[in-house]
Amino acid sequence: MRYGRFYLVLMVTHRCNLRCSYCYMGRQSARSMPLETGRAAIRRAIRSIRPGGVFELGFFGGEPLLEAGLVEELADYARRAADAANVELRLGLTTNGTQATGEAWRVMLRQDLDLCVSHDGLPKVHNRSRRLPDGSGDAKQVLDMIRRLQDAGRAVRVAMVVGPASVELLPDGIRWFGEHGVRRIDLTLNVWARWRQPDVVQLEQSLSRTADLWRASLPESSVNWFDEKAARLAGIPVEPTARCAFGDGAVAVAPSGNLYPCERLIGEDRGDHPLRLPGNALDGENYCGQAVVKEPAAACAACAVAGQCNTVCRCNNYVRTGDIRRPDALLCLLDRVCYRETARVLRPLTTTPIKN
């Protein structure tokens, strides 16, 4: 049975020009994806989707724009193949914002591409973790790229990593982005880090302050951790995605063609990874039947906010607990606090009388 929606991530290269302290991809290598491997992966994905369905295609690295020509070629190929199969195509790419070559710039300006630029907020925070090989930070370079994209009329979404070393300054980073015209922010928790109890306490405090900033910036701005909670509280349908289908409707492909249920598990593409999917992108006709067990943990059934929960990321669960079905205390706290703070800052909207 084919899917109504399928998410494919192509790791077009393992190369990266940065040396981020929280990188989870392992040692850098010069491996890039052969064009035919990418095309075969796309064909398999489209054959996994029924006519009228949605094909979500993401480009990943390393730094994907080091292979901007390959990204452009594969994006155009996917467009033609999706149109021929009567499948809607949605393209996405996350970049570190340091590539300004002609090909990279052309890719970033594609109007059919959802573009996300990685930046961790305040320059001192960003430069602490995201460094060039010579040890220097690139915060100014990335901000200049964001401004250049804004001047070109390009909508920019920013991905911001939140870790123990940066969590205290999370609200300041959100405010700083607003001062520089960045309106769409996707927060990502550094699940690979060791979070001590003081860090967890600080996370809760920073989330409360950030929720206040988010509320004050509505409706012009968005912060993903609160946007989804607000939609659920209001009963507004959330835009569906196959991103967390984890093998059963979502597949990531390494440059070698090896298959994984999530791009964040590719790492150095070692053959002994316990969650690596069988086969290779070049081997099969489609991705149907590649499912990895994904039932929620039974322990979550008794949780009071289970219906509003977002701890369904099997990759996060696996990193934190070794069990794709079970979140740990940190992930549960993040979800509960975001739910609570979203409800708190939106409560005045439901209690203030409407003036005639």
Image: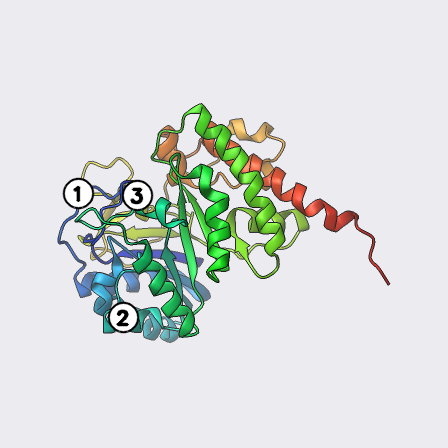
Residue pushed farthest top?
A: 197
Residue type, numbered disc 3: Ser
Where residue 129 is drawn, which disc sits there?
A: 3
Which label belongs to residue 27? 1
Q: Quadrant of residue 88?
A: bottom left
Q: Position of residue 179 (x, y in %)?
A: 49, 58
Quadrant position of the C terminus in the picture: bottom right
Quarter of the image that includes the N terminus? bottom left
State the residue at coordinates (46%, 60%): 180
Task: Say which element carries label 3.
Answer: helix
Q: Amino acid at mark 2?
A: Glu
Q: Tell how many labels.
A: 3
- In the rendered structure, are the residues bearing label 1 and label 3 in contact, judged by CB atoms less than 8 Å apart? no
Which marked residue is nearer to the observer: mark 3 or mark 2?
3
Q: Nearer the viewer, residue 214 or 250?
A: 214
Residue pointed to by mark 2: 72
- Residue lying farthest to the left in this orientation: 30
Q: Locate residue 77 relative to residue 179 in the image: left or right.
A: left
At a point 48% along the width and 62% down the height, the residue shown is 181
Earlier along the polypeptide chain: callout 2 or callout 1? 1
Please report contact status of discs 3 and 2: CB closer than 8 Å, yes or no: no
Compare marks 1 and 3 and give the one earlier in the sequence. 1
Label 3 neighbourhood size at 10 Å, few (<14), some (14-19), many (20+)?
Answer: many
Residue 293 in the image: x percent, y percent? 39, 38
Whether tag 2 and tag 1 are in contact, CB under 8 A, the answer is no
Q: CA distance from mark 1 to mark 3?
A: 16 Å
Above or below for 75 versus 142 = below
Q: At which x and y percent is residue 283?
A: 21, 55
Q: In front here: 342 or 290?
A: 342
Q: On screen, 73 above or below 302?
A: below
Q: Secondary structure at mark 1?
A: loop
Q: Amino acid at mark 1?
A: Arg
